[in-house]
């Protein structure tokens, strides 16, 4: 019983830390939305908790790589790197500026970013290639791709899943930030992928579906991946604009440039 | 007896792989049965299936981890279907990926236009940082493969289909970069690129020995810039002979790089080859043949004659 209590305490402390990092990340994303360029805020806020959990768990080991394939959520990636201390300054200070590497889509010249993404689909095969490299080396390293549900409309994703299945790259993890939105509206209006879990399973993936804002569920899913002998997919149901009530669930919040007064209001209203 | 370009590639890569365990061999279902590399190194051979973009993007991940992935498929699929992967992974992020592309030009013959590749060099050369090599003959193909292994740069190597050729003589084992000279003593210099272009230039020079002939093996922007001084030693007027379209061809770039010289192009024009036939018959349909080239050469040699290209 004593051991169980200790475990419970540790889990609690971990989740508490993740919540703290998540809050800091979201604040930085809002700061970026208030810059002269604005950012893809909706998808950045939806993917925040997934990135925090993944980076916190895996990025300390150089054998692991995490690629944000939905590169338009660069603000979230930069903010996560900032929250974790990998990036020293608040990315809002340089985002989008001519003297800064903090471009609107992830830049591989920045520490902590292995691959420039933005054109959708490419981060998935890169991560799969990294995963395969680790298997060839006899390493326990992993390759993780974080993609969007809209991104899955790209044929390249499925071409890659086919290869991942064929080569049994079981140290590859695909995390789908299923926020239901894409640039021009709702995914289910434009080109629905309602049976995404079944699709992954038909490609030989072990698949789980979770609440992508619940750190406990994310953690359990990652344990499932580590125990799996198959390529693994996490379908993470998320909310576009998560944490900012004014824009939660609104596909129009795909991209936003906000005034300072709104920045302060949104930070105060964060849930 | 010499080997075809793609057989030479497989043989040379397999030999190098004996000494270099970082080399990986990727194919996209067009490597054929009994692949030499697969037979010898099955753990480092990957038939990715018909998945060209995925192959190049995955090769980026493999290269990032220190491997040297060689990916081979037909030139048109490698260059056009996967253009964005080449742009990003190889051009922009400079991942150490080597693409080996047989079926360059119209060497697919009766396979038809879907399998021809008269645009690949123009597309790939648009992206900075990628070495582009069109070796002529077995010896040069082996040299290029060895150089590709030693170089940290991404490579696009264009080969033909089944024809085999004897490479031009070289003084220096390392001389592939950037060019080989066959010197004449006249003002007109033929610049040959690739297998068929070089064959034609060799034939012309046998009849017109006063013409200079320079064979270019590396034809990416950087290599061409580095070749300028040497090229200008061999004439004021250049005729580039290349199994490619004019648009994006090497002549169009050289014309800009050598504003004080006259640069002409002998190429495959703008037609789509709609018939079957052998490689040579398809080239004939595109007027990329000895007779047409000779006519162009005569016009250039005949000072004052109007040259209609």
Image (cartoon, coloured by chain):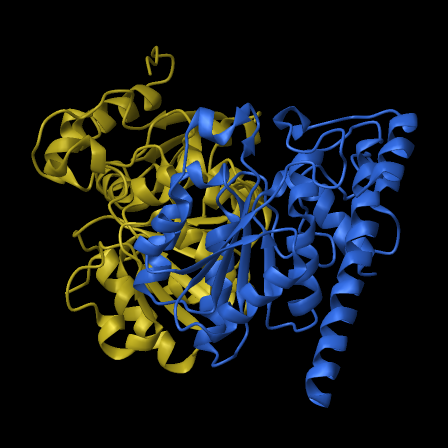
Q: Which residue is located at x 70 percent, y 71 percent?
A: A60
Q: Is residue A190 left or right of residue B295?
A: right
**x and y, in percent, of residue B71 in the image:** 36, 57
Judge by depth and name the residue closer to the eye, A265 or A31. Answer: A265
The answer to whether residue A49 is above or below residue A36 is below
Q: Is residue A271 left or right of residue A127?
A: right
Q: For chain A, what colour was chosen?
A: blue
- Residue B85 visible in the shown view: yes
**x and y, in percent, of residue B41 in the image:** 30, 77
Location of the C terminus of chain B (image quadrant)? top left
Image quarter for residue B21?
bottom left
Q: Which residue is located at x 50 percent, y 69 percent?
A: A224
The answer to whether residue B111 is above or below residue B57 is above
The answer to whether residue B169 is above or below residue B184 is below
Judge by depth and name the residue closer to the eye, B208 or B264. Answer: B264
Residue farthest to the top, as pictured: B306
Residue farthest to the front, as pictured: A1
**x and y, in percent, of residue B135 in the image:** 34, 53
Chain for colour yellow: B
**x and y, in percent, of residue B283 in the image:** 18, 32
Judge by depth and name the residue closer to the eye, B44 or A196. Answer: A196
Location of the N terminus of chain B (image quadrant)? bottom left
Q: Is residue B135 left or right of residue A107?
A: left
């Amino acid at each position: 019983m004593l051991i169980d209590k200790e475990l419970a305490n540790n889990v609690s402390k971990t989740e508490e830390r993740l919540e703290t990092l998540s809050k800091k990340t979201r604040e930085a994303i809002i700061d970026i939305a208030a810059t002269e360029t604005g950012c893809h805020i909706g998808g950045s806020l939806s993917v925040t908790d997934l990135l925090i959990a993944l980076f916190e768990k895996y990025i300390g080991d150089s054998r692991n790589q995490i690629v944000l394939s939905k590169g338009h959520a660069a603000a979230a990636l930069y903010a996560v790197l900032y929250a974790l201390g990998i990036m020293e300054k608040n990315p809002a200070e340089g985002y989008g500026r001519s003297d800064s590497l903090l471009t609107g889509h992830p830049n591989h010249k920045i520490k902590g970013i292995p691959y420039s993404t933005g054109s959708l689909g490419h981060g998935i095969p890169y991560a799969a290639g990294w995963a395969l490299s680790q298997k060839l080396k006899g390493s326990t390293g992993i390759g993780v791709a974080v993609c969007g549900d809209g991104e899955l409309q790209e044929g390249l994703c499925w071409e890659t899943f086919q290869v991942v299945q064929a080569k049994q790259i079981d140290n590859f993890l695909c995390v789908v930030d299923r926020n239901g939105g894409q640039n021009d509206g709702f995914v289910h209006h434009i080109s629905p992928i309602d049976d995404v879990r079944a699709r992954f399973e038909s490609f030989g993936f072990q698949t789980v579906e979770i609440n992508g804002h619940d750190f406990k569920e994310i953690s359990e899913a990652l344990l499932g991946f580590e125990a799996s002998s198959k390529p693994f997919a996490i379908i993470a149901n998320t909310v576009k604009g998560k944490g900012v009530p004014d824009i939660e669930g609104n596909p129009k919040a795909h991209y936003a440039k906000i005034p300072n007064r709104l920045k302060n209001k949104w930070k105060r209203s964060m849930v | 007896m010499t080997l075809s370009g793609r057989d030479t590639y497989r043989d040379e890569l397999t030999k190098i792989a004996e000494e270099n365990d970082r080399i990986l061999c990727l194919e996209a279902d067009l490597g054929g049965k009994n692949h030499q590399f697969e037979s010898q190194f099955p753990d480092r051979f990957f038939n990715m299936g018909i998945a060209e973009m995925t192959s190049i993007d995955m090769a980026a991940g493999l290269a990032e981890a220190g491997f040297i992935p060689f990916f081979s498929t037909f030139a048109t699929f490698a260059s056009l279907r996967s253009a964005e992967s080449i742009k990003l992974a190889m051009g922009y992020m400079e991942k150490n990926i080597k693409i080996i592309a047989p079926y360059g030009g119209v060497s697919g013959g009766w396979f038809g236009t879907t399998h021809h590749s008269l645009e690949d060099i123009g597309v790939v050369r648009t992206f900075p940082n990628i070495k582009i090599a069109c070796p002529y003959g077995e010896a040069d193909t082996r040299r290029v493969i060895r150089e590709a292994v030693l170089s940290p740069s991404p490579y696009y190597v264009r080969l033909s289909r089944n024809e085999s050729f004897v490479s031009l003589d070289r003084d220096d084992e390392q001389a592939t970069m950037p060019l080989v000279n066959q010197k004449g003593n006249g003002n007109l210099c033929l610049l040959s690129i690739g297998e068929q272009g070089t064959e034609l230039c060799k034939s012309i020079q046998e009849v017109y020995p006063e013409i200079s002939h320079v064979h270019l093996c590396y034809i990416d922007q950087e290599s061409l810039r580095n070749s300028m001084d040497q090229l200008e030693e061999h004439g004021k007027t250049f005729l580039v002979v290349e199994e490619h379209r004019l648009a994006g061809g090497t002549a169009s770039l050289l014309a800009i790089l050598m504003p004080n010289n006259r640069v002409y192009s002998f190429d495959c024009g703008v037609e789509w080859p709609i018939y079957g036939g052998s490689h040579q018959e398809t080239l004939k349909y595109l007027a990329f043949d000895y007779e047409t080239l000779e006519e162009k050469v005569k016009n250039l040699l005949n000072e004052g004659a109007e040259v209609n290209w």
